[in-house]
């Protein structure tokens, strides 16, 4: 096999981290890995080495919400996708609600509704919470103390995001002020165009 | 999940406001409809003509009415508000008006931009390589196990103290009843009968008791003497009198 | 990382077989792998390449009964099972039972109960055996052939005793005030009503 190098001597640390991550049923943080492989192992260095090693392979090592797991390479999806895996499509309401939560979190239900222009049915948030992508994130200290929502580590893992900073286009949206409330955006516009009249 | 199944796949596409494939249930409210109409202008939402958009919306609602479609109240409220906005935008500017119609129009535009941005963001999220759909975890991981091992703690003192407790708890108990000075009933009968012969008048029962410093013995003697008096009364040998409950008892020979 | 080679260009076949085996819920035969990766792929060659590649790593590709699967390298199995030591105080019931066994061994459960005056739960003896202080010591040749229990060498070591003869006798206990009946009566009350009972 010209394209498959022979086995290289690996450090014990790399082998150990590789084995632990491979065997784990769930993504693991560096601390958790450390608890298994023992003191004195440079877990971060081993993770970096493994990430590089697996980068071009059929399986990749990825970091999601500071936790690591192996997964199959995205370009091989067609080999692995089985019909039964075709997950039920989310409703448009659920997709938009999820996007609003992800890009604005923490965000209250009223704020979600203000952006969407319609009330959200109880079921929409339930579906997202049941999927494990959205969680209650405490109450906002304003009158009425509304509950706010935020995304979870599972959300990032599911959508292949290392962190919320990787949300598609979030920097552009932020720069365009499209993640600010309308009142703030209006003030900003007034400032930019100068005071009118008065 | 009433809205989850029905709303995603079958969103009606409206090429323009003129060509109506009317199904108001297909929109998620007036803002959604407005956004669809705005996109038909095929310009950046930031450059959209609000006046034109208002015209589109009002025409759409008018057509819906013509077709006698039931129109939800919020679409009509939006129509009324847009008609008002349109008239404000067209009328000569009133500097006193706050907020100005331009500001209202701008707010509407910002709302449409935000909804549009989130709609696109949602679509981009859904198109990512998703776990369980495009990329897969190891299907049969061995799993990691944490085995809790108890290190039991006890020291020698605990041990021998525990044994002491057990033994002490179950040591056969020997009960010794202390001997107490008592006057038996026979003795009291004999004594009361003998003394009664010497007393002709009513006499308190206590005067029959022996002189003693021993309180315990005195109590015993009193109880026995009382029972002896009852016995002698039964035999008709003496009479007992008591003026009230707990009053002193008097006896005399019958 | 001197021991971690940079990513090498891999053949599509090797990547595909690697991903399919990784995502499979069960070991797969070469035919089954072929069904996933498609015609014209030399599955056997890919398997051989992967087997060689993973030979020295934390995970290995292994063949069992003509079916292939990944598994953690055998020498790293200990990492997957991590023991956590937790210091726990022995319950009063367990200490008493241990003391009775130490003073009376070999002693049957019924005899322990007779001496204690209280029944002992199965768990109590289990705890003492798990601690390594008590062992089964044969059956008594009486009707029912009850199992008897005795203490272990670990027991002596843990309690700092050279032999069981070092345990203080009844007279010593009495002299030390450890047989005071009033205390015992109080203890009994605590035992019966307190939360520490079995």
Image (cartoon, coloured by chain):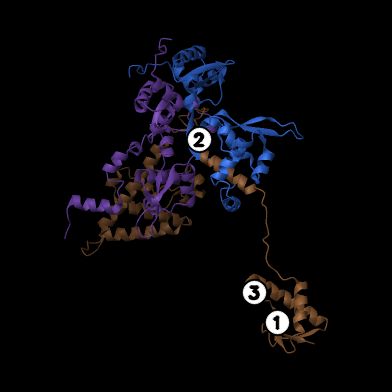
Chain colours: A purple, B brown, C blue
Rounded to the nearest whole Å, what is the CA distance between mark 2 and mark 1?
76 Å
Residue C106, position as x, y percentages in the image: 66, 33
Of circles 1 and 3, which is in front? 3
Residue under the point 67% across and 38% down = C109
Residues flagged by tags 1 and 3 on a common chain: yes
- Seen from the viewer's position, the closer of residues B112 and C61 is C61
Q: Is residue A82 visible?
A: yes
Residue A72, position as x, y percentages in the image: 45, 26
Dot 2 crowding, Cα within 10 Å, few <14, some 14–19, many 20+: some
Residue under the point 54% across and 31% down = C156
Question: Where residue B212 is drawn, which disc sits there?
Answer: 3
Question: Where residue A108 is drawn, which disc sits there?
Answer: none
| Farthest residue, direction bottom | B201
- Seen from the viewer's position, the closer of residues B55 and B241 is B241
| Farthest residue, direction front | B198
Residues flagged by tags 2 and 3 on a common chain: yes
Rounded to the nearest whole Å, what is the CA distance between mark 1 and mark 3?
15 Å
- Seen from the viewer's position, the closer of residues B16 and C184 is C184
- Seen from the viewer's position, the closer of residues B214 and A121 is B214
Helix, strand, or loop for circle 3?
Answer: loop
- Read off the chain for label 2: B
Side of C13 relative to C188 (left or right): left
Residues flagged by tags 2 and 1 on a common chain: yes
Of circles 2 and 1, which is in front? 1
Q: Which residue is mark 2?
A: B151
Q: Which residue is mark 1?
A: B205
Residue A5, position as x, y percentages in the image: 40, 12
Helix, strand, or loop for circle 1?
Answer: helix
**Labels 2 and 1: the sequence-earlier one:** 2
- Read off the chain for label 3: B
**Labels 1 and 3: the sequence-earlier one:** 1
């Amino acid at each position: 096999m010209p394209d498959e190098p022979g086995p290289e001597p690996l450090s014990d640390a790399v082998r150990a981290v590789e084995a632990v991550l491979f065997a784990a049923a769930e993504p693991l943080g560096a601390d958790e890995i450390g608890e298994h492989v023992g003191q004195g192992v440079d877990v971060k260095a081993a993770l970096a080495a493994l990430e590089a090693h697996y980068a071009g392979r059929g399986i990749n090592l990825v970091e999601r919400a500071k936790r690591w797991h192996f997964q199959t390479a995205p370009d091989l999806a067609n080999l692995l996708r089985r019909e039964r895996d075709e997950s039920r499509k989310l409703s448009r309401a659920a997709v938009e609600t999820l996007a609003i939560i992800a890009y604005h979190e923490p965000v209250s239900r009223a704020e979600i509704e203000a952006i969407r222009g319609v009330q959200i049915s109880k079921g929409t948030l339930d579906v997202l919470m049941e999927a494990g992508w959205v969680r209650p994130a405490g109450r906002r200290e304003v009158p009425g103390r509304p509950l706010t929502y935020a995304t979870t580590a599972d959300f990032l893992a599911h959508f292949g995001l290392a962190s919320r900073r990787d949300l598609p286009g979030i920097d552009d949206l932020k720069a365009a002020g499209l993640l600010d409330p309308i009142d703030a955006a209006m003030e900003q516009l007034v400032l930019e165009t100068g005071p009118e009249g008065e | 999940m009433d809205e989850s199944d029905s709303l995603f796949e079958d969103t009606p596409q409206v090429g323009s406001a003129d060509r109506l494939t009317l199904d108001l249930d297909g929109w998620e409210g007036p803002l959604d409809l407005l956004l669809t109409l705005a996109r038909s202008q095929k310009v950046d939402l930031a450059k959209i003509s609000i006046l034109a958009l208002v015209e589109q919306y009002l025409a759409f609602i008018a057509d819906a009415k013509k077709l006698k479609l039931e129109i939800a109240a919020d679409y009509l409220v939006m129509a009324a508000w847009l008609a008002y906005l349109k008239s404000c935008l067209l009328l000569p500017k009133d500097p006193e008006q706050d907020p100005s119609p331009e500001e209202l129009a701008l707010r509407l535009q910002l709302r449409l931009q935000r909804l549009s941005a989130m709609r696109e963001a949602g679509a981009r999220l859904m198109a990512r390589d998703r776990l369980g759909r495009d990329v897969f975890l190891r299907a049969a991981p061995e799993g990691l196990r944490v085995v809790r091992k108890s290190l039991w703690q006890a020291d020698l003192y605990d041990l021998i103290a525990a044994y002491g407790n057990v033994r002490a708890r179950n040591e056969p108990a020997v009960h010794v009843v202390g001997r107490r000075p008592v006057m038996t009933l026979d003795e009291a009968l004999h004594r009361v009968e003998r003394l009664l012969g010497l007393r002709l008048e009513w006499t308190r029962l206590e005067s029959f008791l022996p002189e003693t410093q021993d309180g315990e013995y005195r109590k015993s003697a009193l109880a026995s003497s009382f029972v002896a008096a009852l016995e002698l009364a039964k035999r008709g040998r003496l009479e007992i009198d008591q003026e009230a409950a707990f009053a002193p008892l008097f006896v005399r020979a019958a």
